[in-house]
Image (cartoon, helix red, strand yellow):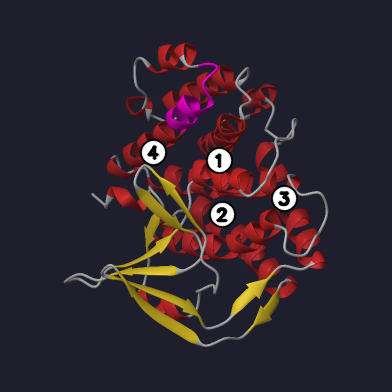
Amino acid sequence: MKNKNVYRGLLAVSAIAVMTSCSGDSDTVENNDNIIEAADTVVEVNDALEVEYSVPTPNELFEIVKLQGGEQKVGLVNPLENRDNYVETKEKALNFGVYSADLAYMSCFGVGTEFLMYMKTIEEMGDELGISGAFDTDLMDRIENNEGDTDSLFAISNETYYDSYLYLEENGKGMELSLIMGAGYIESLYIICQLTNGYEEGDPIIEKIGDQKLVLENLMEFLATYQDDENVAEMTNDLMSLQEVFEISMDFEESGTNVDNNDGKLVLSGGGSFKMNEQALKDITAKITEMRENIIK
């Protein structure tokens, strides 16, 4: 079984990518004694020289955006009435990821009235995907007892996503796991793009959108494990087209590479970074909206 920290913000990838995918900025958020470093590359120094990239979960990502001034907007999540459209396993896995990201958004920004309905939908879809064992039998009671407590709902949402991840991983459901993670990323980026009010240089939310280029690279490294599956290969191709938009539209600024030792971890930064601009925001928003619409239709 893989290290559980893979879900809690870390995806193990190859050492070759370390020097080519680093961003120069470092943003951190503390979550349950874990530090999520969303931009720099963290290399664990141990006997195996394990290399790990930092990737925030949907819950952690929305929490970062909220702390940086993002404000709730209604009407951004995938309507529950679309749920009956998802018949095939691929469609269910994709929209399980979408609804999970929606749940994270609602829990973070305090949209509590719909939380229970979305959680019930995710539980039903999880049962159909064969991951009912990932759900606590007392889950709905816990939600109802904490309906007005944003922090508790946020924790429940994060725990549910985490348990689902581990269950899929441990039970050989790599295809479903890949599609869930890919669609969850797409939905999260879509929502964040919708939280902006046009381009403004230095806007922390817009800068966070730019940081998703690194997250995307790490996600694609993870999906490479399951490329033999045609559905995962198709998801990877879609994400590659998004990666091209990031690279073509954003401004690249070269810089030297820095290597720091932080409590036994090598933190690699520099080597060049991509910066957001007005056209990049428009292009990324248009592309992610198109990708999202293809999933939820």
Q: In the image, which disc is placed on residue 94?
A: 1
Q: Which residue is mark 4?
A: 162
Q: Which class describes the residues within 10 Å of circle 1: few (<14), some (14-19), or many (20+)?
A: many
Question: Which percent across, then down, holds residue 229?
Answer: 45, 53
Q: Which class describes the residues within 10 Å of circle 4: few (<14), some (14-19), or many (20+)?
A: some
Q: CA distance from mark 4 to mark 1?
A: 16 Å
First in sequence: mark 2 or mark 4? 4
Amino acid type of disc 2? Met
Q: Which residue is mark 2?
A: 235
Q: Secondary structure at mark 4?
A: helix
Residue occupying image coordinates x 51% and y 26%: 122
Quick check: 125 above or below 259?
A: above
Quick check: 42 above or below 72?
A: below
Q: Residue furthest left?
A: 47
First in sequence: mark 3 or mark 1? 1
- Nearer to us of marks 3 and 1 is 3
Residue occupying image coordinates x 75% and y 31%: 75
Question: Which percent across, then down, holds residue 174?
Answer: 38, 47
Q: Is residue 24 left or right of residue 206?
A: left
Q: Which residue is mark 3?
A: 193
Residue occupying image coordinates x 48% and y 58%: 219
Is-magenta flag for residue 156?
Answer: yes
In the image, the segment drawn in magenta is 147-157
First in sequence: mark 4 or mark 1? 1
Quick check: 134 above or below 213?
A: above
Question: Which percent across, then down, holds residue 118?
Answer: 57, 23
Q: Which class describes the residues within 10 Å of circle 2: few (<14), some (14-19), or many (20+)?
A: some
Question: Which percent across, then down, holds residue 65?
Answer: 61, 47
Q: CA distance from mark 2 to mark 3?
A: 20 Å
Is-magenta flag for residue 222?
Answer: no
